[in-house]
Image (spheres, rainbow, N blue to C red):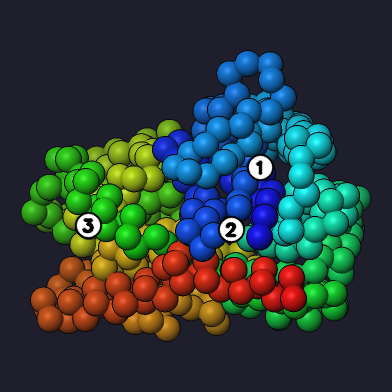
Amino acid sequence: MKIWIINHYGEVPPQGNYLRQFRFSKELQKMGHEVEMFSASTVHNSTYNHSKDSRPFKKVVIEGVPVTFIKCRNYKGNGKDRVLNILDYFFGVQKATKNLAAPDIVYSSSPHPLNWLAADRIAKRSGAKHVAETRDLWPETFVMLGKVGKNHPMARLLYGLERFIYQKADALIFTFPGHATYLEEMNITPKGEVYYLNNGVDLEEFDRNTLEYPCQDLVMKSEKFKVVYTGALGLVNGMQLLIDTARLLKDERDLEFVIYGDGNEREILEKQAENLPVRFMGRVEKKYIPGILDKADLTLMLTKKTPMHYKYGVSLNKLFEYMASGTPILSNIETRFDIVEDVGAGRTIGSENPEDLAKEILYFKNLSESENEKYCLRAREGAATYDFKVLSQKLEKIFLDLKK
């Protein structure tokens, strides 16, 4: 089959961190399919831009995967420039695919509905089947966060686009397990079959990177109990809870919080963490994450609770990296679809109370070696079910069933 992947945020190594579609591309190629990615030239949450000149499109081959970068303007935060960046991609990807030989499958991945709409137009023009994937709920997430009212014109437009795609696409994929609940609550009956395909991890690549890029940071080589967080740094990511917890544990001389990541609120957080056992290490390339986690004693998945609060489940990339490293996980993301608890990879607390989090950290710190090993083994075993080789086989079956 010939497959086009339409994903505004379809990033590639080494700059990108959101590599879901890139990994699918590599695995589908191994299965004998012809795959091409169409991505924005910008890298989300960074200033990097693959486009260095005025060309509207730039085609390259990365690790054997053909990738066409659509020239998009840089942006920071969620203001006007990000909206214009979205429009750059929406119009640009349609132009970039206009005169190419038609594919069999157009596979589009959110977060924003305009990505789906561009893919819908491309599929209709080329006669291909359209598989629409939902990674984030736009605008539902923003409505539940209180950032926009449900009846705001923009929200109504996005809800309308979402409903349009769900009722028109040939198949739907959701990365969170509670998708059926969401569709029922929204009173949406999809046209095609609906599938659940969470995020995952390439275990072969993860293990290789663990060996090839061992962490050289002195803080990770210490004998202290290292509580590690990787990812975006913002209040919505539970960073205030982490700082407040570190303040309670500052007298634990053999314990340290180590944070890898960046975000708009990093400077504020660093000031709050002065004189606390918290180390901010900055953003690192994805290939270094396995080596970092290999030296961690406990990993954190945190969030600031909202009315939505992962109501439909968790699909965070860090979850599967944590599991792959065989390191216990402590989460405060309470959901009825709790992978951490289901696989026994760690513990989940339904609290934003720093005293509760501190208590749980000390629980893991004081575990016997044998009990700790049980968490480690279950984490790694759980990761195997989310290996991209396994997920890619499921994805291929979805595509093949559409072509019958």
The mark closer to the camera, 1 or 3, is 1
Report the mark closest to the observer, 1 or 2. Answer: 2
Q: Is residue 106 left or right of residue 383?
A: right
Residue 65 visible to an observer of this rendering = yes
Q: Where is residue 387? Give x, y as percent.
A: 42, 68
Three-letter amino acid code at disc 3? Asp
Q: Residues within 10 Å of mark 1 (few under 14, many from 20)?
A: many
Q: Nearer the viewer, residue 24 or 88?
A: 24
**What residue is rendered at 51% in x and 63% in y?**
31
Estimate the x, y position of residue 118 in percent, counting from the top left: 81, 47
Type of residue at label 1?
A: Phe
The disc at residue 33 is 2
Outermost residue toward the top? 53
Answer few, some or many: residues within 10 Å of disc 2's Cα (few below 14, many 20 plus, some between 14 and 19): some
Q: Is residue 169 above or below residue 49?
A: below
Task: Name the residue nearer the viewer: 236 or 56.
Answer: 56
The one nearer the camera, 58 or 233, is 58
The Cα–Cα distance between marks 2 and 3, rounded to whole angstroms, is 34 Å
Vertical arrangement, residue 391 with respect to residue 33, above or below: below
The answer to which quarter of the image holds residue 380 is: bottom left
Which of pointers 2 and 3 lies earlier in the amino acid sequence?
A: 2
Q: Residue furthest left?
A: 223
Which residue corresponds to mark 1?
Answer: 38
* Residue at image mark 3: 294
